[in-house]
Image (tube, rainbow, N blue to C red):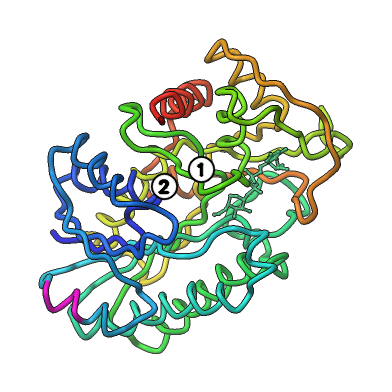
Amino acid sequence: MKILVTGGTGYIGSHTVVELQQAGYEVVIIDNLSNSNREVLKGIEAITGKAPVFVEGDCTDINTLRKLFEENPGIQGIINFAASKAVGESVQKPLLYYRNNLNTLINLLECMPEYGVKGIVFSSSCTVYGEPDVNPIDETAPIKPATSPYGNTKQISEEIITDYVHSGAPIKSIILRYFNPIGAHPSAKIGELPLGVPQNLVPYLTQTAAGIRKELTVFGDDYNTPDGSCIRDYIDVVDLAKAHVVAMRRMLDGEDTDSIEIFNLGTGRGVSVLELIHDFELSTGMAVPHKIGPRREGDIEQIWAIPDKANNVLGWTAETPVGETLANAWRWQCSLK
Ligand code: WQD
């Protein structure tokens, strides 16, 4: 079975390619390398012993996609990771985000019936929920108005898929709403490669422990949470990657599944920023110099998942303890030059 992974040299994409290959799928990657590099392909091959087919290209150009499908016949499914994903940048450059994220998806959907592609797994985000009224949340939690163009592209993308399937398009889709992916492959051959100053907590934290950053700023400890810092549902990136393999198998092999299914992918456990720092120090023995700073604009106070639907319907559960995930992140950080 051949699967196209867009954005497959990115953080979550590369970990998913590894799991797809290890599950016996043939993988074709398309990536424009705008937020990743070719070295990732060596890391994937070092883990699985198999080099995925790699096409350097931009999914916003439908001719690039048509050429890829013609040169790689037999693609049965797509996992779409290719998107711009920095919340803050999306506020500064909304048109770049709408053009890249929406045109990519529309082009892929248009190509699917033309080339006999049966299903698409879409990389969505818990950001579509905004600030939940109550936590934890399942898939029936209300979708709130997006708080950033990035989050809006995820909401609109879900609607585009829904409308296209409801129009009678001969395809299926599984939409996966990720909570906070963290960590790295235990082999330390692939991991997160943030460009410039990391915006996300864990890469900033590991760079601080490595002495690359002077100290970590905790963005606020005056929230209405037990220790005052924000709470998130941190999910191991390999566990997350495995969920995509299960979703692809369900979508392509599952007889009586709905044409569209949505799953929250989380651990079901809320962890605060200060707890995560403590967990990191415990599991690695490394100190993380940190201070309390002002809140970051746009931050949600607390959000974590009810993962029952993914556990019981999809048949997938996040298993890696957060301490092990953080140890893997640290091992990856140490492997970087
Ligand atoms: C987590 C917590 C920060 C950095 C975003 C997107 C989401 C997804 C993941 C793309 C927050 C705090 C962070 C720092 C800190 N992106 N923090 N100091 O904002 O929950 O989610 O990234 O798919 O869609 O919204 O993740 O890692 O940026 O922040 O205190 O230096 O860590 O305030 O509470 P976030 P994050």
**Label 2 vs 1, first from the N-terminus:** 2
- Give the number of the mark in front: 2 or 1: 2
Q: Amino acid at mark 1?
A: Pro
Q: Of 13 and 224, which appears nearest the observer? A: 13
State the image coordinates of residue 287 (x, y, percent, origin top left). 64, 15
Residue at the far right: name it.
222
Mark-to-mark CA distance, 2 and 1: 9 Å
State the image coordinates of residue 24 (x, y, percent, origin top left). 14, 47
Q: Of 3 and 70, which appears nearest the observer? A: 70
Which circle marks residue 11 in the picture? 2
In screen coordinates, is 226 left or right of 313? right
The residue that label 1 is drawn on is 181
Q: Quadrant of residue 288?
A: top right
Task: Estimate how packed mark 2 is, as few (under 14), some (14 to 19) or many (20 or more) residues with alpha carbons within 10 Å.
Answer: many
- Disc 1 residue lies near ligand 1 with CB under 8 A: yes
State the image coordinates of residue 106 (x, y, percent, origin top left). 41, 81
Secondary structure of residue under mark 2: helix
In screen coordinates, is 292 left or right of 23? right
State the image coordinates of residue 9 (x, y, percent, origin top left). 33, 52
Task: Estimate how packed mark 1 is, as few (under 14), some (14 to 19) or many (20 or more) residues with alpha carbons within 10 Å.
Answer: many
Query: For the point 45% across and 48% down, which residue is it?
Result: 310
Quarter that holds the N terminus = bottom left
Q: Of 322 and 188, which appears nearest the observer? A: 188
Q: Of 260 and 123, which appears nearest the observer? A: 123
Q: Looking at the image, do the residues carrying marks 2 and 1 touch, with CB atoms under 8 Å apart?
A: yes
Relative to 171, residue 89 above or below: above
Query: For the point 26% across and 43% down, which residue is it?
Result: 18
Q: Would you say the magenta stretch is mainly helix, strand or loop?
A: helix
In the image, the segment drawn in magenta is: 67-71
Q: Is residue 69 magenta?
A: yes
Quarter that holds the C terminus = top left
